[in-house]
């Protein structure tokens, strides 16, 4: 199985690159952000709770996102592999993901990080907010909080995969196709 974690701060291009990767490798896309927005759209209790935190630029509790990922893994037993986008965002989530995959005789193939500087991220997120209608993209203060959450809680997840020799960094600034090419080069190494 090819199980990829696409890593990087909000606005790094994880969603854009995920779409291209799922087409090329026939993977299931698991974006916890999309799953949470789905819960909000359906007006579920989980969605209502999550919305408060998301609108404030904070992470939702680990147990909530781990539970959602566990359900999706169970619902896609015959998948060729998964691309995890926006998950794991804490070391506790990374540990839980390893355990979930191990219980299915599988494992993460590797994590690839898209590197983008903070100024470029803020510019991209404000641009995206004009089109996507995402409240958390429209407000510079919330954007800065999300980048801070990333630096405080999510950046350490890179070390978790580095310790397992499963981490690679690539430049996330440039054309979508060039970045995709660099990602494919990394993924082909996992496939060898
Ligand atoms: P995203 O679409 O990945 O930028 O996520 C949007 C928001 O959903 C984040 O700012 C968090 O509030 C929440 N969220 C998404 N994924 C996670 C996660 N793995 N852990 C905690 N919160 C998450």
Image (tube, helix red, strand yellow):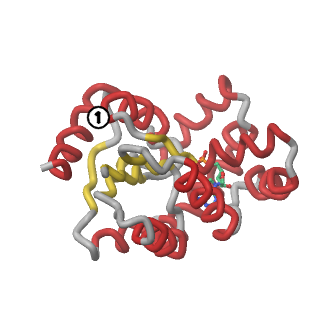
Count of numbered labels shown in the rendering: 1
Drawn side of residue 113 relative to residue 89, left or right: left
Query: Visible in this render: residue 127?
Result: yes
x%, y% of residue 59?
Answer: 66, 62
Determine whether 40 is above or below 149 in the image.
above
Viewer-proximal residue, 12 or 127?
A: 12
Picture quadrant where residue 108 is located: bottom left
Q: Position of residue 167 (x, y in %)?
A: 28, 62
**Left or right: 148, with 183 as reference point:** right
Q: Nearer the viewer, residue 75 or 44?
A: 75
Q: At 76% from the left edge and 55% from the top edge, which residue is drawn?
A: 56
Mark 1 residue CB less than 8 A from any atom of ligand 1: no
The residue most toward the front is 78
Give the left or right position of residue 3, taking residue 28 as reference: left
Residue sitting at x 46%, y 74%: 99
Under tag 1, what secondary structure? Answer: helix
Q: Residues within 10 Å of mark 1 (few under 14, many from 20)?
A: some
| Closest to the observer, 156 or 147 | 156
Considering only vertical position in the picture, is 31 above or below 132? below
Locate residue 94, reporting x and y percent. 47, 69
Name the residue beneath numbered marker 1: 179
Q: Is residue 1 left or right of residue 40?
A: left
**Where is residue 119 shown, x and y percent of the image?**
48, 44
Which residue is located at x 75 percent, y 39 percent?
A: 135
Which residue is depicted at the point 87% across and 55% down? 45
For the question of whether residue 156 can be seen, the reply is no
């Amino acid at each position: 199985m090819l199980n990829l974690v696409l890593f990087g701060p909000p606005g790094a291009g994880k969603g854009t690159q995920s779409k291209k990767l799922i087409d090329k490798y026939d993977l299931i896309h698991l974006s916890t952000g999309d799953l949470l927005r789905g819960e909000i759209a359906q007006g579920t209790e989980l969605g209502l709770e999550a919305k408060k935190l998301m609108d404030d630029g904070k992470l939702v509790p680990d147990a909530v996102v781990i539970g959602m990922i566990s359900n999706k893994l169970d619902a896609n037993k015959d998948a060729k592999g998964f691309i995890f986008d926006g998950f794991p965002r804490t070391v506790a989530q990374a540990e839980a993901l390893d355990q979930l995959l191990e219980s299915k005789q599988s494992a993460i193939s590797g994590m690839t990080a898209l590197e983008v500087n903070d100024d470029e991220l803020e510019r991209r997120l404000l641009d995206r907010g004009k089109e996507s209608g995402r409240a958390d993209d429209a407000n510079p203060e919330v954007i800065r909080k999300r980048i801070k959450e990333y630096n405080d809680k999510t950046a350490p997840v890179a070390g978790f995969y580095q310790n397992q020799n499963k981490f690679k960094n690539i430049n996330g600034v440039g054309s979508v196709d060039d970045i995709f090419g660099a990602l494919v080069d990394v993924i082909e190494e996992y496939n060898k």
